[in-house]
Image (tube, grey):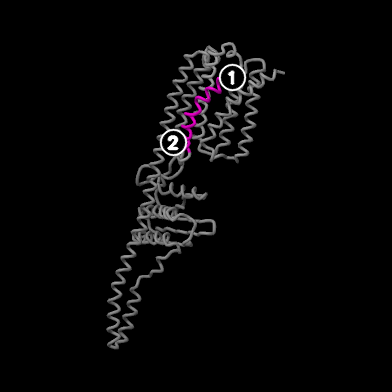
């Protein structure tokens, strides 16, 4: 049985070498955990105990077990991380490798300083001097790294929706990780000897400084892309609102025209009434009734904004020779933001009309079904199509009008996610659902 002070030294090092970096890795995804915070905390506690046991194995068991224990520790850490975090695999892998590189730098730097200040203790495993130096190094690195994680990196991984870029970005920290691994382990000298040489530490500091600068640039580029995507979606929202505005303006002009014409109709009917020409008056009234527009067909639901959009697209569908069927039950007081509602309907129907409008086939049709309950909104927009649906490798649909994804479908997915809903897009047998 080793003495108590040696056990405490191993525990101190194991905690310092594991917990701060795990917390740092979890931080960007704290709102995207697969388990509850309580379960996640319990799993971290179990993993911490395992790390302490592994540290004790290296310190107190005979033989050189450091490499084996390091591999086991890394695998357990990675397995837990990928299970605990519910996010795109590229993002989690990038984060895991990035934090691992920082942790490796902290350990090497601490060992190098320990070698200068406590040369006798530095050649021993897990002494208090190592834990003290590691604590000092982590304290030194904590502020700039946490500020980067909080202000730059977390917004980048939280707001970026598609995950396409992260399929490849993880290769950046992976490259630096392999360089570090090669420098430490593929060498005639032991890892301890390498760590105690200041020039090796300076080399690793230079690598990690460049690595960290690249991390900052990557996160900033992702944030800029997020801003551009948000701007595109905002512009698309404005387009949908403009469509509503234009439609309502047309209706106002139409109403004014009818009001102007009605005065002439009334004057003529009064003249026929004075002359007693009741037969002609009856014929004129019948003719006038037949010429009046059927306003009821333009009222699709009680929600005026949605109804106006449905009516607007009905005119476009009619002029394009598209059969346009609508069954909508949307109240005026639905608990969904009116802008989101307009974008939701507008994007889906606009895409359907574009798909049908560019189709030379006959029997083109769009079927819209919408039903709002007390706590839900169900919307289905189906349309005929011929030709090929362009899809992106990572999911989603590519636009035939411009380079990149269809903004409409991405906006619909984002709105559905905003209200904890689901958006599905399927196609087959000449129909897009």
Q: Position of residue 278 (x, y in %)?
A: 32, 86
Up-down relation of residue 160 to residue 212 (above or below): below
> Residue 232's quadrant in the figure?
top left
Residue 141 is covered by the magenta coloring:
yes
Up-down relation of residue 117 to residue 23 (above or below): above
Asked which secondary structure carries label 2, the reply is: loop
Q: Position of residue 266 (x, y in %)?
A: 30, 79
Q: How many marks?
A: 2
Q: Disc 1 and disc 2: Cα gap in Å?
A: 33 Å
> Residue 126's quadrant in the figure?
top right
Q: Which residue is mark 2?
A: 165
**Disc marking residue 112:** none
Asked which secondary structure carries label 1, the reply is: helix
Up-down relation of residue 305 to residue 286 (above or below): above
Label 2 crowding class (10 Å Cα cut-off): few <14, some 14-19, many 20+? some
Give the residue furthest to the right: 1
Magenta extent: 128-157
Label 1 crowding class (10 Å Cα cut-off): few <14, some 14-19, many 20+? few
| Along the viewing direction, whichever of 375 and 174 lies nearer the viewer | 375
Q: Which residue is mark 1?
A: 67
Camera sees residue 101: no
Q: Residue at x 48, y 36 (%)?
A: 154
Q: Residue at x 39, y 49 (%)?
A: 387
Task: Compare marks 1 and 2 and give the one earlier in the sequence.
Answer: 1
């Amino acid at each position: 049985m080793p003495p108590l002070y040696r056990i405490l030294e191993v525990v101190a090092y194991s905690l310092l070498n594991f917990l701060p970096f795990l917390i740092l890795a979890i931080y960007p995804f704290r709102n995207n955990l697969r388990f509850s915070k309580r379960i996640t905390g319990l799993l971290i506690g179990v993993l911490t105990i395992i790390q302490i046991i592994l540290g004790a194995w290296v310190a107190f068991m005979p033989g050189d077990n450091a490499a084996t224990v390091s591999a086991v520790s890394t695998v357990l850490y990675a397995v837990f991380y990928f299970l605990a975090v519910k996010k795109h695999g590229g993002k989690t892998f990038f984060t895991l490798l990035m934090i691992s590189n920082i942790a490796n730098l902290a350990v090497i730097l601490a060992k190098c300083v320990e070698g200068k200040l406590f040369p006798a203790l530095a050649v021993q495993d897990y002494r208090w001097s190592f834990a003290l130096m590691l604590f000092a190094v982590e304290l030194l690195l904590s502020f700039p790294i946490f500020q980067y994680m909080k202000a730059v990196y977390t917004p980048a991984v939280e707001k970026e929706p598609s995950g396409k870029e992260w399929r490849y970005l993880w290769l950046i920290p992976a490259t630096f990780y392999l360089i570090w691994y090669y420098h430490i382990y593929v060498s005639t000298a032991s890892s301890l000897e390498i760590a105690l040489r200041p020039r090796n530490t300076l080399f690793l500091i230079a690598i990690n400084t460049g690595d960290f600068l690249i991390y900052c640039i990557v996160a900033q580029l992702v944030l800029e892309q997020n801003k551009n995507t948000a701007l595109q979606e905002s512009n698309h929202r404005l387009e949908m609102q403009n469509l509503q505005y234009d439609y309502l303006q047309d209706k106002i002009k139409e109403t004014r025209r009818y009001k102007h014409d009605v005065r002439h109709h009334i004057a003529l009917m009064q003249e026929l009434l004075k002359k007693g020409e009741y037969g002609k008056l009856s014929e004129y009234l019948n003719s006038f009734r037949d010429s009046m527009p059927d306003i009821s067909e333009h009222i699709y639901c009680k929600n005026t904004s949605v109804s106006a959009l449905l009516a607007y697209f009905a005119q476009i569908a009619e002029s394009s020779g598209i059969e346009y069927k609508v069954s909508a039950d949307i109240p005026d007081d639905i608990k969904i933001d009116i802008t989101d509602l307009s974008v939701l309907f507008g994007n889906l129907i606009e895409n359907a009309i574009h798909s049908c409008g560019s189709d030379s086939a006959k029997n083109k049709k769009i079927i819209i079904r919408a039903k709002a309950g007390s706590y839900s909104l169900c919307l289905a927009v189906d349309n005929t199509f011929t030709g090929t649906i362009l899809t992106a490798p990572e999911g989603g649909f590519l636009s035939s009008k411009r380079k990149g994804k269809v903004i409409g479908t991405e906006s619909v997915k984002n709105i559905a996610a905003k209200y904890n809903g689901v958006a599905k897009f399927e196609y087959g047998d000449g129909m897009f659902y």
